[in-house]
Image: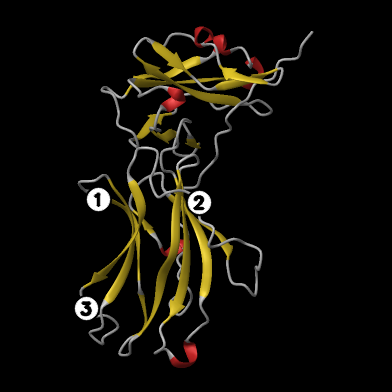
Amino acid sequence: MRRRRILLVLLPFVSLVPAMASQPGHPLDCSDWVITEPGITCVDVQTCDAATNTDFPCMNVPGSGFDAAGNLVGTKHVEIAPPFCGTGAGRGREELLSFDGGSKHVFGYVDYRCVSAGISCFDRIIVNARGFDPTTGRLYVWFTSRSTNNCGPIEYPDRNWLATFNGFPTTFEILQTYTPSAGALQFRVPYMPEGFQSADSFSTYWGNLEDLPDFTQAHPMACNYPASPPAVGTYLTVADTSPTPSAGRGKYLVTSVKHSTQRRYGRQLIAGVLSGRDPVLLPPCP
């Protein structure tokens, strides 16, 4: 008898508690970014200084700068009106944004930070290179965190580092995040979800892990949402009404996508062959 194996998407547990920002007089990092769009995160991947990491390819930034929805994704330097640090000097800001050809959308920003009032001494951040990988929905940015040359003895050496901004729509997958304390399931509508040209609606189910790979035992949790076909990149949130598993047991969550009369809900690996899961096995969602 052939053994059947099924490929599951594990749902990452995420924290809603913001990271503590760095202190004035220290290099700006991911904790200093103000993220204004739910689902977007900044991860400090690696220090890029040659002295500490000679092999890491910080200049080898993948992607073309366009996300899976066809929007240009990147960073932009803007100037904020003075005064700054009590000297009247201009204040800089780096924005994380996308551009659809007609308007821009800001996902987050980080400001230069005053270290000492009365003198032009501040922490700043510089973008060296960037690129977007639509397959993973990640924007890669190589930064330099720098102290101005007016800080005297509290001036610190440059810190070169690579960051990823995660949470943008990917090419096919519905990447779900699950937070038990908040009782919610969230994801961004991907480009060509599960290979469909677009999505008319989504339905989310829960089930017991011991029932897998029998998806006929899945329980509908949220059906045919949102009310109208969503645009690529739309951030959807579903209330989690599934019961908390008892000790030693677990549950799974799976989301299907509907396009016209068809629906799909991920892939499976059987005898080394990857294929779509049989939509007939998933119960109807009223």
- Please report the residue visible at 62 percent of the width from the left and 62 percent of the height from the top: 56
- 107 sits left or right of 82 in the view: right
Which quadrant would the N terminus be assigned to in this image? Answer: top right
Return the residue found at the far bottom.
152
Picture quarter containing residue 247? top right
Dot 3 alpha-carbon crowd within 10 angstroms: few under 14, some 14 to 19, many 20 or more = few
Q: Where's the C terminus, which quadrant?
A: top left
Mark 2 and 1 residues: CB-CB less than 8 Å, in contact?
no
Check whether the beta carbons of the residues at disc 1 and disc 3 lie within 8 A of each other: no
Q: Residue at x 26, y 83 (%)?
A: 89
The residue at which mark 1 appears reads as 104
Earlier sequence position, callout 2 versus callout 1: 2
- Residue 16 vertical placement versus 253 (above, below): below
Say which residue label 2 marks: 62
- CA distance separating discs 3 and 2: 36 Å
Q: Earlier in the sequence, mark 1 or mark 3?
A: 3
Which residue type does callout 2 highlight? Answer: Pro
- The quadrant holding residue 53 is bottom right
Name the residue located 55 percent from the left edge and 34 percent from the top edge: 11
Look at the numbered discs 3 and 2 and tell me whether their residues touch, using CB distance below 8 Å: no
> Of circles 1 and 3, which is in front?
1
Where is residue 148 shown, x and y percent of the image? Answer: 40, 83
| Marks 3 and 2, the one that precedes in the sequence | 2
Q: Residue reaching furthest right? A: 1
Judge left or right: residue 49 versus residue 150.
right
How far across and how far down the image is residue 133, in percent? 47, 45
Secondary element under disc 1, as helix, strand or loop, is strand
Q: Is residue 22 visible?
A: no
Residue name at image x 34 percent, y 40 percent? 70
Q: Secondary structure at mark 2?
A: loop
Q: Amino acid at mark 1?
A: Lys
